Image (cartoon, rainbow, N blue to C red):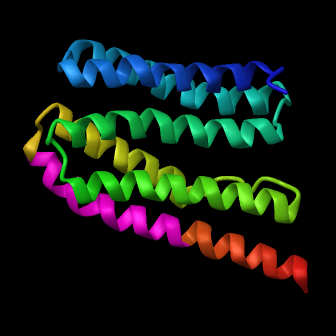
Amino acid sequence: MFSTISNWVSISRIFLAIPLAYFVWIEDKPLIIIITIIGLFTDFLDGWLARKLNQESEWGKILDPIADKIIIGLPALVLIATGKIPYWLGTMIISRDLLIFVGGVYARKKLGYVIPPNWLGKITVNVVSICVLMIIFELDFLYNTFFILTPIFVVASFLSYLFGMLKRIKQMDD
Protein backbone atom coordinates (compact mmCIF):
# COMPACT_ATOMS: atom_id res chain seq x y z
CA MET A 1 0.00 0.00 0.00
CA PHE A 2 2.50 2.68 1.12
CA SER A 3 5.48 0.58 0.10
CA THR A 4 7.19 3.08 -2.18
CA ILE A 5 9.76 5.64 -1.13
CA SER A 6 7.81 8.42 -2.83
CA ASN A 7 4.66 7.54 -0.85
CA TRP A 8 6.60 7.73 2.42
CA VAL A 9 7.92 11.13 1.38
CA SER A 10 4.31 12.28 0.86
CA ILE A 11 3.35 10.89 4.27
CA SER A 12 6.24 12.78 5.86
CA ARG A 13 4.81 15.98 4.37
CA ILE A 14 1.47 15.25 6.04
CA PHE A 15 3.23 14.98 9.40
CA LEU A 16 5.05 18.27 8.75
CA ALA A 17 1.68 20.04 8.83
CA ILE A 18 1.34 19.62 12.61
CA PRO A 19 4.52 21.44 13.65
CA LEU A 20 3.96 23.96 10.86
CA ALA A 21 0.51 24.82 12.25
CA TYR A 22 1.95 25.07 15.75
CA PHE A 23 4.74 27.41 14.65
CA VAL A 24 2.20 29.54 12.77
CA TRP A 25 0.16 29.70 16.00
CA ILE A 26 3.13 30.86 18.09
CA GLU A 27 4.49 32.97 15.21
CA ASP A 28 7.95 31.37 15.14
CA LYS A 29 8.89 32.68 11.72
CA PRO A 30 12.35 31.06 11.40
CA LEU A 31 10.86 27.60 12.05
CA ILE A 32 7.96 28.35 9.68
CA ILE A 33 10.54 29.09 6.97
CA ILE A 34 12.47 25.89 7.68
CA ILE A 35 9.37 23.67 7.63
CA THR A 36 8.03 25.41 4.53
CA ILE A 37 11.31 24.77 2.70
CA ILE A 38 11.25 21.12 3.79
CA GLY A 39 7.61 20.87 2.68
CA LEU A 40 8.37 22.37 -0.73
CA PHE A 41 11.38 20.09 -1.16
CA THR A 42 9.42 16.95 -0.22
CA ASP A 43 6.58 18.01 -2.55
CA PHE A 44 9.05 18.10 -5.41
CA LEU A 45 10.90 15.00 -4.20
CA ASP A 46 7.93 12.62 -3.97
CA GLY A 47 6.93 13.18 -7.60
CA TRP A 48 10.50 13.07 -8.83
CA LEU A 49 11.20 9.81 -6.98
CA ALA A 50 7.98 8.23 -8.25
CA ARG A 51 8.94 8.98 -11.84
CA LYS A 52 12.69 8.28 -11.47
CA LEU A 53 12.17 4.96 -9.66
CA ASN A 54 9.15 4.03 -11.74
CA GLN A 55 7.02 3.92 -8.58
CA GLU A 56 4.00 5.91 -9.70
CA SER A 57 0.99 4.43 -7.93
CA GLU A 58 -2.69 4.99 -7.22
CA TRP A 59 -1.78 5.65 -3.58
CA GLY A 60 0.75 8.25 -4.63
CA LYS A 61 -1.90 10.02 -6.70
CA ILE A 62 -4.00 10.16 -3.52
CA LEU A 63 -1.30 10.91 -0.94
CA ASP A 64 0.40 13.80 -2.74
CA PRO A 65 -2.71 15.98 -3.09
CA ILE A 66 -3.87 15.05 0.43
CA ALA A 67 -0.49 16.14 1.77
CA ASP A 68 -0.83 19.45 -0.12
CA LYS A 69 -4.31 20.00 1.30
CA ILE A 70 -3.29 19.23 4.88
CA ILE A 71 -0.07 21.23 4.88
CA ILE A 72 -2.00 24.27 3.60
CA GLY A 73 -5.27 23.60 5.44
CA LEU A 74 -3.92 23.38 9.00
CA PRO A 75 -2.04 26.68 8.87
CA ALA A 76 -5.09 28.26 7.19
CA LEU A 77 -7.23 27.08 10.12
CA VAL A 78 -4.74 28.65 12.52
CA LEU A 79 -4.83 31.90 10.56
CA ILE A 80 -8.64 31.90 10.69
CA ALA A 81 -8.58 31.18 14.45
CA THR A 82 -6.12 34.01 15.09
CA GLY A 83 -8.01 36.45 12.86
CA LYS A 84 -5.08 36.92 10.46
CA ILE A 85 -6.94 35.68 7.40
CA PRO A 86 -10.48 36.66 6.48
CA TYR A 87 -12.91 33.92 7.42
CA TRP A 88 -14.39 33.80 3.93
CA LEU A 89 -10.99 33.31 2.29
CA GLY A 90 -9.89 30.59 4.73
CA THR A 91 -13.24 28.85 4.33
CA MET A 92 -12.94 29.07 0.55
CA ILE A 93 -9.47 27.49 0.59
CA ILE A 94 -10.46 24.67 2.94
CA SER A 95 -13.84 24.04 1.28
CA ARG A 96 -12.24 23.70 -2.15
CA ASP A 97 -9.87 21.09 -0.83
CA LEU A 98 -12.61 19.16 0.98
CA LEU A 99 -14.89 19.21 -2.05
CA ILE A 100 -12.10 18.06 -4.37
CA PHE A 101 -11.24 15.26 -1.92
CA VAL A 102 -14.88 14.09 -1.66
CA GLY A 103 -15.27 14.35 -5.43
CA GLY A 104 -12.07 12.38 -5.90
CA VAL A 105 -13.34 9.58 -3.64
CA TYR A 106 -16.61 9.52 -5.59
CA ALA A 107 -14.79 9.51 -8.94
CA ARG A 108 -12.48 6.71 -7.73
CA LYS A 109 -15.49 4.53 -6.90
CA LYS A 110 -17.34 5.43 -10.08
CA LEU A 111 -14.40 5.27 -12.52
CA GLY A 112 -12.17 2.74 -10.78
CA TYR A 113 -9.11 4.99 -10.86
CA VAL A 114 -7.84 8.18 -9.26
CA ILE A 115 -8.13 11.34 -11.31
CA PRO A 116 -4.65 12.87 -11.25
CA PRO A 117 -4.10 16.48 -10.25
CA ASN A 118 -4.05 18.94 -13.14
CA TRP A 119 -1.72 21.87 -13.73
CA LEU A 120 -4.29 24.46 -12.68
CA GLY A 121 -4.64 22.66 -9.34
CA LYS A 122 -0.87 22.60 -8.89
CA ILE A 123 -0.62 26.32 -9.68
CA THR A 124 -3.47 26.98 -7.23
CA VAL A 125 -1.64 25.15 -4.44
CA ASN A 126 1.34 27.45 -5.03
CA VAL A 127 -0.76 30.62 -5.22
CA VAL A 128 -2.58 29.70 -1.99
CA SER A 129 0.71 28.80 -0.29
CA ILE A 130 2.26 32.13 -1.26
CA CYS A 131 -0.83 33.99 -0.04
CA VAL A 132 -0.69 32.18 3.31
CA LEU A 133 3.03 32.96 3.62
CA MET A 134 2.40 36.62 2.77
CA ILE A 135 -0.12 36.74 5.62
CA ILE A 136 2.18 34.95 8.07
CA PHE A 137 5.15 37.19 7.25
CA GLU A 138 3.02 40.34 6.94
CA LEU A 139 4.36 41.15 3.48
CA ASP A 140 1.57 43.53 2.55
CA PHE A 141 3.09 44.63 -0.75
CA LEU A 142 2.73 41.08 -2.13
CA TYR A 143 -0.27 40.04 -0.07
CA ASN A 144 -2.63 42.38 -1.97
CA THR A 145 -1.78 40.71 -5.28
CA PHE A 146 -2.17 37.20 -3.90
CA PHE A 147 -5.30 38.22 -1.98
CA ILE A 148 -6.88 38.90 -5.39
CA LEU A 149 -5.35 35.90 -7.19
CA THR A 150 -6.14 33.30 -4.51
CA PRO A 151 -9.95 33.28 -4.77
CA ILE A 152 -9.74 33.40 -8.57
CA PHE A 153 -7.44 30.36 -8.69
CA VAL A 154 -9.40 28.52 -5.97
CA VAL A 155 -12.67 28.85 -7.91
CA ALA A 156 -11.07 28.17 -11.31
CA SER A 157 -9.24 25.05 -10.14
CA PHE A 158 -12.32 23.70 -8.35
CA LEU A 159 -14.41 24.16 -11.51
CA SER A 160 -11.64 22.57 -13.57
CA TYR A 161 -11.61 19.48 -11.32
CA LEU A 162 -15.42 19.34 -11.23
CA PHE A 163 -15.91 19.59 -14.99
CA GLY A 164 -13.03 17.20 -15.66
CA MET A 165 -14.51 14.61 -13.31
CA LEU A 166 -18.00 15.02 -14.77
CA LYS A 167 -16.61 14.67 -18.31
CA ARG A 168 -14.80 11.44 -17.44
CA ILE A 169 -17.86 10.00 -15.72
CA LYS A 170 -20.05 10.94 -18.71
CA GLN A 171 -17.58 9.31 -21.12
CA MET A 172 -17.68 6.14 -19.03
CA ASP A 173 -21.48 6.09 -19.02
CA ASP A 174 -21.68 6.57 -22.84
Instruction: Residue at 86%, 30% (x, y): give it.
Output: 54
Quarter the N terminus occupies: top right
Up/down of 115 relative to 75, above or below: below
Quarter the C terminus occupies: bottom right
Q: Is residue 12 left or right of residue 53?
A: left
Up/down of 3 relative to 124, above or below: above
Q: Residue furthest front?
A: 81
Magenta segment: does it hold 144? yes
Q: Is residue 77 left or right of residue 154?
A: left
Instruction: Residue at 71%, 53% (x, y): give it.
Output: 116
Q: Is residue 172 left or right of residue 114?
A: right
Instruction: Residue at 44%, 25% (x, y): give it.
Output: 17
- Magenta residues? 141-159
Number of numbered discs on residues: 0
State the image coordinates of residue 78 (x, y, percent, origin top left): 27, 34
In this view, the residue in front, 81 or 138, is 81
State the image coordinates of residue 84 (x, y, percent, origin top left): 15, 41
State the image coordinates of residue 83 (x, y, percent, origin top left): 14, 42
Instruction: Residue at 56%, 34% (x, y): give it.
Output: 67
State the image coordinates of residue 134 (x, y, percent, origin top left): 20, 39
Q: Is residue 64 left or right of residue 131?
A: right
In this view, the residue in front, 55 or 106, is 106
Quadrant of res 146: bottom left
Quadrant of res 113: bottom right
**SS majority, magenta:** helix
Up/down of 24 relative to 86, above or below: above
Magenta segment: does it hold 119? no
